[in-house]
Structure formats: C-alpha cells, structure tokens
Image (cartoon, grey):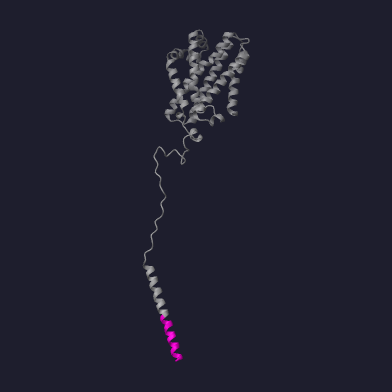
Amino acid sequence: MQISLTDSLSHAADSLHEVTDSTMGAITDSLLAVPPVQTSPVEPEVIIRSARNAFSGSILLPENGSDFAMNSLGWGDSPINWGLICLFTVLFILYLGRLAELLPYLFTGIGRWKAIVNLEDSMGRMRDRNGVAVIMTIPFCLVCSRFDLLPMKFLSGMSPGLRTLGVVGILLGFFLLRAILIEIVGNGKASRDAFQISNRSAYNFFILATLTMVLATGVMGFAGLDDLTIRRISYYILGFFILVNMVRRTQILSNACNQFTAILYLCALEILPLAILIAAVMLF
C-alpha cells in the first residue's frame, strides 16, 4: 500500500514536469513567432522661415532695435550717410559750373605755383574756390568713413552714420588747429599777401585730392577691388597732393622771404598739424 502511494506521487510529479515543459515551450514559440516592433527614428522638427525673417530674430541676428543689430547695418543703409550723399549731390549740381571754371587753374597749380597766385587775383574765383572747398568736405568725410581712412578705435565702435559724423568732427578739429597755428605764427618776415595765398593754396589741392579720391574709389569699387587695396591707393592720392601742396607753399613763401624761413613756416603750419593728426589716429 505504501509502495503504491509512492509510485502514484512519483507519476504525478512526472506528469507535472511534462505539462510545465510543454507550456513553457508553447510560450517561447509564441514569443518567437511575434515579429519585432520596428521603431522609426525621431526626426527633428524642421522650422521653415521666410527669407525675410531668416536673418532676423534670435537665430542669426538679434531683434531689430538692439545695439548689435544697429551696428550690423551696412554703410549704405545709414540714413545719415544717405542724407549727406543727397546734400552733396544737390550742392555739387549747383556749383558744377563754377567748378568747371576753376579746374584749369587748379590743375595748372600742380605744375606752376604762379597759377595759384593768378587764381587769387580774382575775388570772384577765390570766393568760388572757397565755396567748392567747403562742399568737398562732405565727400571727403564720406570716403574716409566708408574705407576707414582714419582707423581710430573709438570710431570703430560706432554705427556707420555716427562714424561719418565723427570723421567730420575730426576734420573740423584739424582745420581749427591749423587756423590757430596760422594766427599764432603770423606772417612774420613774409609779406601778408604771400602768407595768405600760401595758406589758401591748401584749398586748391584739397579739392583736387577729394575729386581724385571719389573718382578712384568709385572705379575701384566697380572693378571689385577689396577695401584694403582701395584704402592704400587713397593714402597714395592724399600723400601725393599733400606733398605737392608743401612744395608749392614753399615756393610761394620763398618768393617773399628766404627759403629757410619758408621751410620753417612749412614745418609749423603743415607738418605739425599733420603730425598731431597722425598721432591722434595712432593713440585713439
């Protein structure tokens, strides 16, 4: 009886193992039969913006009105620069006939100092020359601002329009310094007429230098030259007319006094203001 009970329990345990094995096998087969789930990669969200808005806002450029956005405007986008260009255009048209009459005297003055004296003999021509020189300060400052001919640190942080106004202030300061030195030095041993003619001769070469720079920078800009090349050529143009002005002033003064005195006048009235301007550009 006891042996029979033991055999029954053993047979039941074997049956339970068989059922468990068959059940686990069926579960495994069912799991293997299920196809794997295909997970698609998450694509990043693409934001399509209009061409006008693509370069504004916080993605590429700051919003309009911020300091960086104002300083990022191009030189030609400045209302101040455009206003000065329009003002010069109007004044240039009004003075075009007078400039045409002056040009023969101005160009002749490059090679002959007596042509400068002959221009001063006519009060009308001298008045027209002075008026044209004042008008030429506008394109001169615009060219200096556009091509950074006065590479001063405080100007580089300004917007294009304010940078042009800064150049105007520097040029006016240079003229004021020169006028103060003329009053301090006086004519001395030279005759008053020769002294005044030599001082005003700078207006002639300022007009020629500005006209040459405007034409040269325009041609070079259309030719696709880089700003560095245009800047260097502009320096050469200015240097040439400054040198010619010094030579002609020395000749005019030498005719009224000795050459040594003329050179002293040249150092005090031309070289000293230029040296102060160059030092200011290097320091500030």
Quadrant of residue 261 within the rendered picture: top right
Q: Quadrant of the N terminus?
A: bottom left
> In this rendering, is residue 63 above or below 252?
below
> In this rendering, is residue 183 above or below 235?
above
Query: Is 5 part of what is drawn in magenta?
Result: yes
On the image, the x and y values in percent for residue 100 come to 43, 14
Q: Is residue 108 left or right of residue 269?
A: left
In terms of secondary structure, what is the magenta stretch mainly?
helix
Query: Is 46 part of what is drawn in magenta?
Result: no
In this rendering, does residue 176 appear at all? yes
Quadrant of residue 198 within the rendered picture: top right
Q: Nearer the viewer, residue 139 or 195?
A: 139
The residue at the point 45 percent across, 24 percent down is 83
On the image, the x and y values in percent for residue 10 come to 44, 85
Q: Quadrant of the C terminus?
A: top right
The residue at the point 55 percent across, 16 percent down is 247
Q: Nearer the viewer, residue 150 or 154?
A: 154
The residue at the point 46 percent across, 27 percent down is 79
- Magenta extent: 1-15
How many labels sit on residues? 0
In this rendering, does residue 232 appear at all? no
